[in-house]
Image (tube, grey):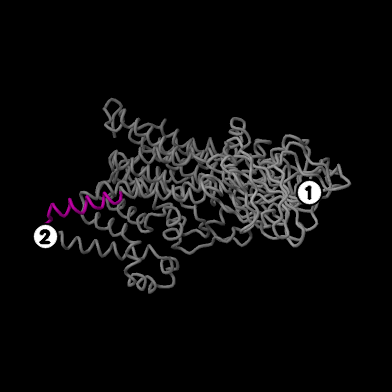
Amino acid sequence: MSSPTSEDPFRTKLDGLLVVALLLWGLAQLAPHLAHPAIYNWDEAMHQAAARGTHDTFFTPHIYKDPLYPGDIRHWWAANVWMHKPTGPFWFGALMMHVVGVTPLALRLASLLGHLAAGTAIYLIARRPAGRLWATLGAMGFLALPFGWQLVQGRFFGDVTDCTLAGCNALAVALLFHATREDSWRWGLAAGAVVGLGFLCKTGLALTPLGVGATLWALSRLRFCPGPRLSTVVAMVAAAGVVAAPWSLYSAWRWPELHDLESRVTRAHLFPDPTVDVGPWRRPLDAVLNEVNRTSLQPLANVLPLMAFGWLLVRAVRKRELETVGLALWVGATWLVLSLGTVKVPAIAWGAVPAVMAALAIAGSDARRHPVLAAVLLAGLATPLAIEHLPVLTRLRESLPASWEQTRTLPGLAEGLVLSLGAAVLTAIVFLLARRPGWMTVGLGFAASAVLAWHLALTLPVEKARYQAEHLEELYVSHTREVGLAVSRHTPKNSVLFAALDFDAPLNFENLNLMFWSGRMAYRRAPDVALARERGYHPYLVSPLAEPYAPVPGIPPQAALRAYDLEAPLPQPAPLPDGLTPLSVRQGNLEVLGFASRGLGHGLERYAFYVRALGPPQPLRITFHGPGGIAERVLETGATLRHPQALRGAAWFILPTLGPPRAKVTQLEFGAVGQRVALSPASP
């Protein structure tokens, strides 16, 4: 440990500059499109709705504030008070809504900050055992992981809770190491406070740093490696309790039945409990090392995390360094506990991925001095190519015992282990027989380090950029944003929405999305005006059709849905909204009456085509012509979120789509070889 007066070579201006550079790199990788309007089903849809509810009643997180219909506390997807996940991220999102407005960006900022904290912590942890260059590469690789981008953008299970968990775990471990080196219980308090914040984001999985700290203390007493003083560990535990305990105790007192249920759901992820539903994610013992790690670290070879962990164990025994032993405890404990658990969702081990990336950085740095390690890394990195060209590896994998369920059925891990073991044995034999030649150490070390550095610095960000570009349009598909925002401005607070929708858009829960944007309770069911009146709510209808009610003002014409006042019936369906570009085009059984659009940036524009069915509805084929070429869209009737029979007889209905910027469109063509309509120039 360094004394307060000794100069620390890893606490210089260069370290500060590298941290700033990593933060900028992380922002460049993760921040673009973070405010996109698409809210994906399951985790983010629930979390955004809960964050909006927390914004309205800060200490009563909810989805339905005052449900019209009786609920079941087991149905967390339609809950009143919502405690299916810890409340910490939703408090943050609610506070950010007071800063940036009611937008998905508010909650996603927590995910972004979590990843930036994790990237910074990777550098701070790995710079001593791996050196600054490799610590930087490890942090860069983490911030460029394609799956990390999915989580930050809210496109997968876990999203904000797992991102904040990763940040809290990594930062707490970095602070623990610093507290140990400084021999400071005060830094232990800081580490514990971060653990407490992590507990408010992901409960038990956030306690890993406490286990690491306690084990390091025990190992230091056995003189195995440096470790914190007992006072530091006690300070960590105390600070974690001070931060996390008040809300846990309050929520257990305020909503005892719900708190007990959700506690059992949490425990059921580790221990089977037939009294609660944990979904379809029950997985075998080896799922963490196969499915989970492969999902988290793509496109890296699936065997690399296990190799990195193995090298941590070897180096921990040899050198007994604080950081190496601590990282090994972090990764090993996480994988062991989750492997023994019942449920293994794709992002469940994300809290340990920063430790895996730090371990890869250490292995990459050490490869130039250890030819066997270098050979193992090269074999692991070459596994995907070897699987393609060596079918014998597949046959070996398929011959494994059936009890190794995923190792036997999923390609990657078994083949990588066979290749690595072969490379290690062969290299060790040649190295010893050739009397430890320097050229072999240098050659293999340079090759392994270069290939791994290439993957961390180039392959990961390139793959992330490819994935992002491939899914860019999906980020800007939203049926509910425009109508929800208008409803929030032009209807009373005591309003309830009935969505006349037959199904959800792909990857969406439209009633939750509508509640987020509008701040009103929304139900996807037939309107019950009498019940709404009885409960003191003004009822409104949300629909993609012309309905016989007075339209809610302020809804832009490019919106995919319209809203109507159910207390103000009309003798005939509502007219077309103002602001349309009128058309009169026939394509098969459809008549196109007009369209409206609005730019979204990023080369995209939101279009709404107003259509009438003159017979059985059919797809509408539209080709956008412009100086830059053409873009074709086929608008299925399902884009209305109504069944075809509901569209027949409607005065008009809306078919939404994304297309090129209106300013760059000179003609619209309807049908495969159909009518062309010239458009007047539009302002960019």
**Side of 286 relative to 580 (left or right):** left
Quarter holding the C terminus is top right
Quarter holding the N terminus is top left
- Which residue bears the numbered disc 1? 546
The image quadrant that residue 519 belongs to is top right
Q: Nearer the viewer, residue 362 or 273?
A: 362
Q: Which span of residues is magenta-colored?
A: 435-452
Q: Nearer the viewer, residue 166 or 16?
A: 16
Badge 1 marks a residue whose secondary structure is: loop
Amino acid type, callout 1: Ala
Can residue 483 be seen in this snapshot? no
**Side of 236 relative to 278 (left or right):** left
- Which residue bears the numbered disc 2? 434
The image quadrant that residue 395 belongs to is bottom left
Say which label, 1 or 2, has the lower sequence index: 2
Residue 599 in percent (x, y) is at: 60, 39
Badge 2 marks a residue whose secondary structure is: loop
**Side of 623 relative to 129 (left or right):** right
Residue 515 in percent (x, y) is at: 69, 44
Asked if the stretch drawn in magenta spans residue 191, the answer is no
Residue 598 in percent (x, y) is at: 63, 40
Can residue 448 be seen in this snapshot? yes
The image quadrant that residue 418 belongs to is bottom left
Residue 402 in percent (x, y) is at: 43, 72
Amino acid type, callout 2: Ala
Asked if the stretch drawn in magenta spans residue 446, the answer is yes
The answer to whether mark 1 and mark 2 are in CB contact below 8 A is: no
Which residue, as the protein is rendered here, is positioned at the far right? 571
Q: How many marks?
A: 2
Q: Is residue 245 above or below residue 257?
A: above
The image's mark for residue 121 is none
Q: Residue at x 38, y 74 (%)?
A: 399
